[in-house]
Image: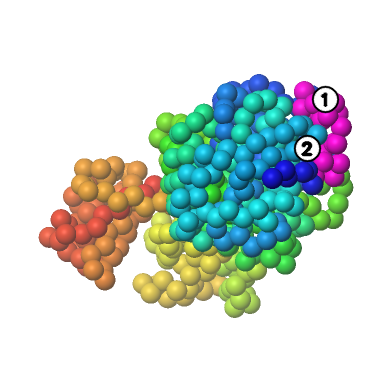
């Protein structure tokens, strides 16, 4: 089968010399190199320069290129393949790697041969000229998908990562980000979603990526049609990277069509590469302005609840990191005495919304204290603790004093002390005895039978 171009002259030049001139001006030979990259799939006039920045980092010596794109024209719960096919365009002819496609097709629960998903699909085609500029001799494995089934994408990724080891391979994840929000919202949402990609692979937590998409769409759905039109390819690529021992994602550029051409409604573009780095824990590292904004948000939410008996509503958060899901505790102190503390050990709200919610709950729903009064409002000091993911440990020797918060669980009983609580104890044993006996009611004698988790926090104080 010959699959003729459907995108040349529309998404990219139909003149070979003009195309090569564009690539020679924009694609560089840059380190670090990666076998798995993310590239936008809009018209080159909008996203071509952004795409070129990720292709500048791709490994050049490859025999097979896996291209994972969005299925725009058909519903594709499984990953759709096409075989015995020649992709033909102004660049020349690129043959499908049928050996690899046959190998992937063995997993009939995750893959299917479906030419209809490819004949009119531009998200894969727009990648081919970039690859052809870099390497004149390779075969392609085109994969189109838009289903979001976790199990299908997880198992498909395991098969792809195995297939990539059979030959010298690269993988391009072809996706655009948000569709048609105002410029300012696109900037914040797109950058947040791109950061979530790094957090997800750093913490080996694909569910976090799903959660971020769900929460962003819930908050901003009246402004945008989608958080990422290539969400499924991004999940498939993320799982493939995890199975290939990558542990970081580097954002090279995150922009939108409004940076190229003024518009009331824009489309987001991301270029980035997966990296194999030393083992690291993701840290949010908020700026002074971001910290100031969050403390102001907490104070404002408490004041709003006292005055109007309503939760504060914020239409959008201007800082991308406030649009990421994080577990949060909000602590209120009055003259160095605890006046309320409530939060969550796992993320289920965007950071900005979590601070609003838990600031009010710390003031009015902590069962240890009466509701905050209007006259106390100017006397309280606020502390916000942003938690890292919980890490289960097998021995208390792994607990670092003054660094780790500790969460314990035994049956229906549980409890936690934030790292700030260490200052009230002289030894680790005193800390744990109090946590087991006083806070959770589990009993210190049940330490060996209990689940113990540690975490760190970024603390923000007034």
From the viewer's perspective, is 223 left or right of 391? right
From the viewer's perspective, is 444 left or right of 381? left
Observer-nearest of 222 and 61: 61
Observer-nearest of 108 and 126: 108
Residue 158 x %, y %: 44, 46
From the viewer's perspective, is 170 left or right of 428? right
Residue named by callout 2: 89
Disc on res. 21: 1
Residue 247 x %, y %: 46, 38
Going by the picture, which residue comes out furthest to the left? Answer: 445
* SS at badge 1: helix
CA neighbours of label 2 inside 10 A, class few (<14), some (14 to 19), many (20+)? some
Residue at x-position 56% and y-position 67%: 302
Residue 456 seen in the figure = yes
Whether 32 is drawn above or below 205: the answer is above
Residue 271 seen in the figure = no
Judge depth for marks 1 and 2 and give the one in front: 2
Residue 94 lies in the magenta-colored region: no
- In magenta, the rendered stretch is 7-24
Whether 364 is drawn above or below 382: the answer is below
Residue 5 x %, y %: 78, 43
């Amino acid at each position: 089968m010959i699959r003729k171009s459907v995108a040349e002259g529309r998404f990219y030049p139909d003149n070979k010399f003009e195309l090569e001139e564009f690539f020679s001006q924009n694609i560089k030979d840059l380190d670090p190199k990666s076998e798995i990259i993310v590239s936008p799939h809009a018209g080159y006039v909008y996203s071509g320069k952004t795409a070129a920045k990720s292709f500048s980092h791709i490994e050049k010596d490859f025999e097979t290129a896996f291209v994972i794109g969005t299925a725009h024209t058909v519903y594709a719960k499984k990953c759709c393949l096409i075989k015995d096919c020649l992709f033909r365009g102004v660049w020349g002819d690129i043959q499908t790697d049928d050996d690899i496609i046959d190998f992937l097709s063995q997993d009939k629960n995750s893959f299917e041969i479906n030419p209809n998903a490819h004949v009119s699909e531009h998200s894969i085609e727009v990648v081919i000229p970039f690859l052809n500029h870099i390497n004149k001799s390779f075969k392609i494995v085109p994969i189109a998908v838009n289903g979001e089934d976790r199990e299908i994408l997880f198992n498909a990724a395991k098969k792809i990562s195995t297939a990539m080891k059979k030959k010298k391979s690269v993988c391009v994840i072809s996706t655009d980000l948000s569709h048609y929000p105002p410029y300012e919202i696109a900037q914040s949402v797109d950058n947040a979603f791109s950061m979530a990609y790094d957090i997800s692979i750093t913490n080996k937590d694909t569910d976090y990526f799903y959660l971020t998409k769900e929460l962003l769409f819930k908050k901003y759905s009246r402004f945008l049609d989608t958080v990422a039109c290539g969400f499924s390819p991004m999940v498939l690529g993320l799982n493939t990277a995890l199975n290939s021992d990558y542990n970081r994602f580097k954002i090279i550029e995150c922009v939108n069509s409004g940076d190229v051409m003024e518009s009331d409604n824009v489309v987001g573009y991301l270029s980035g590469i997966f990296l194999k780095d030393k083992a690291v824990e993701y840290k949010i590292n908020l700026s002074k302005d971001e910290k100031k904004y969050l403390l102001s948000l907490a104070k404002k939410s408490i004041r709003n609840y006292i005055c109007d008996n309503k939760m504060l509503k914020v239409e959008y958060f201007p800082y991308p990191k406030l649009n990421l899901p994080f577990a949060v505790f909000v602590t209120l102190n009055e003259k160095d005495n605890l006046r309320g503390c409530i939060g969550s050990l796992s993320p289920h709200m965007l950071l900005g919304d979590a601070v609003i919610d838990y600031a009010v709950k710390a003031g009015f729903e902590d069962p240890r204290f009466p509701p905050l009064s209007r006259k106390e409002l100017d006397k309280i000091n606020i502390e916000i603790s942003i938690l890292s993911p919980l890490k289960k440990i097998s021995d208390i020797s792994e607990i670092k004093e003054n660094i780790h918060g500790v969460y314990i669980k035994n049956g229906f009983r549980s409890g936690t002390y934030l790292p700030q609580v260490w200052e009230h104890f002289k030894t680790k044993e005193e800390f744990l005895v109090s946590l087991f006996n006083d806070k959770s009611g589990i009993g210190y004698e049940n330490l060996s039978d209990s689940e113990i988790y540690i975490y760190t926090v970024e603390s923000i104080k007034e």
